[in-house]
Image (cartoon, rainbow, N blue to C red):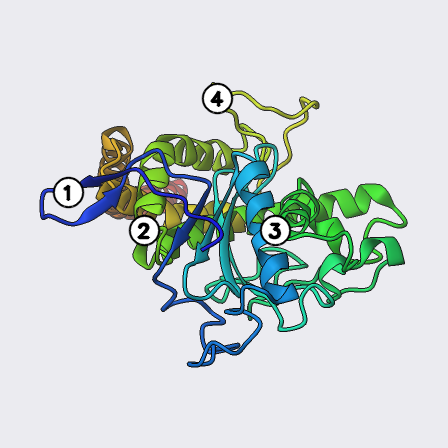
Amino acid sequence: MALSVNPTTKTSHNGEIEETSAFERFHVVSDDSDHYYVSTNRPKKDGGDCFSNGGSRVYKKIMQEWRILEKHLPDSIYVRVYEKRIDLLRAVIVGAAGTPYHDGLFFFDMAFPSDYPNRPPNVYYRSFGLRLNPNLYANGRVCLSLLNTWTGKKTEKWNPSESTVLQILLSIQALVLNEKPYFNEPGYGMLGRALWEKKSLAYNEDVFFLSCKTMLFLLRRPPKNFEAFTNGYFRDRANLILTACSAYASGRVRIGYYTIDGSSSSSTTIIADVSGKFKDLMKQLFPELVAAFKRTGASVETFIEQLESEKKTTSVKPKRERLSKGGNDIARKVIGKIKRVLGLEKNNITKVRKSHAKVQWISAE
């Protein structure tokens, strides 16, 4: 191969080789079995294709892309390329702070066309059937001008002589997974900005909830070559994510702006109202997140105690309500009896008074 990057490895207790916590941002791997495009562009057995012929223009261009990625990837993007399938690539982007995607992981599978770089790579978002961005469809489609999958200015579209895979990844991170993804939809926010801002806040509630659901799916079925990374990543960030969930559900911090010290990273001190729908959704999802993070080895005892305390409070409340209801029924019965007794006594007194008046009238005669 043109590039050979050796991973730092260790042997686990069961003899399997694992990557250490120092997960390399760029690395060449061999297992491509779960890649979305694994069935496309299959290399010919005789080696007579552009992806296996080291002298072809396509091969040389892909090797150039590898060198760019190895040298210039930011800390928040990790890439795996394949030893026997240089036409395939997998990347994961870490959601940026200050956005509703913060601390999430977002995986993309790419496939270079046989005439690369005349056409841009095909890109598939591993969505798990969830749509958490106007540009990322539930079916995995990625709409981006640079990929020629969305309208845009000529300068925004794929340029065979200048555009690179790194530019694609950075564009997705900065332009798609941004602070206010609601406005990615064309035409939104053109008039009546205040109204659109309100809709944007509501959209961010859905985005954060779906981002948390994506975390659960990733932990259940992590993409190949990223298993150890996914587990370790969420183990290290479990407490931050769970605390952010609580802060957002309570309305203490605007969604997307939670920081590690518990404050808001937003430049404004205004806290948006949280919808009842979001509170209910997070209340249902929170225990699942705690359980999933616990399985990674994260220290989530505080959150487990919180859930147990809430469970006890919830179970005691209906009992008190039943007792209160029963007590009220008894009180009503007692009061009813008293009223009836008083009513009878009143009637008797009236009868006595009438009888006494009648006796006096007869005596007068």
Answer few, some or many: residues within 10 Å of disc 3's Cα (few below 14, many 20 plus, some between 14 and 19): some
Indicate the amino acid at tag 4.
Gly
Answer few, some or many: residues within 10 Å of disc 1's Cα (few below 14, many 20 plus, some between 14 and 19): few
Q: CA distance from mark 1 to mark 2?
A: 14 Å
Answer few, some or many: residues within 10 Å of disc 2's Cα (few below 14, many 20 plus, some between 14 and 19): some
Which residue is identified by label 2? 227
On residue 262, which mark appears? 4
Which residue is identified by label 1? 12
Residue at 80% over, 46% down: 195
Indicate the amino acid at tag 2.
Glu
Tell me, yes or no, if residue 323 can be seen here: no
Point out the tag, 2 or 4, that comes first from the N-terminus. Answer: 2
On residue 316, which mark appears? none
Q: CA distance from mark 3 to mark 2?
A: 27 Å
Secondary structure type for disc 3: helix
Residue at 35% over, 35% down: 238
Tell me if label 1 and label 3 are in contact, CB under 8 Å. no
**Left or right of 254, for residue 107:** left
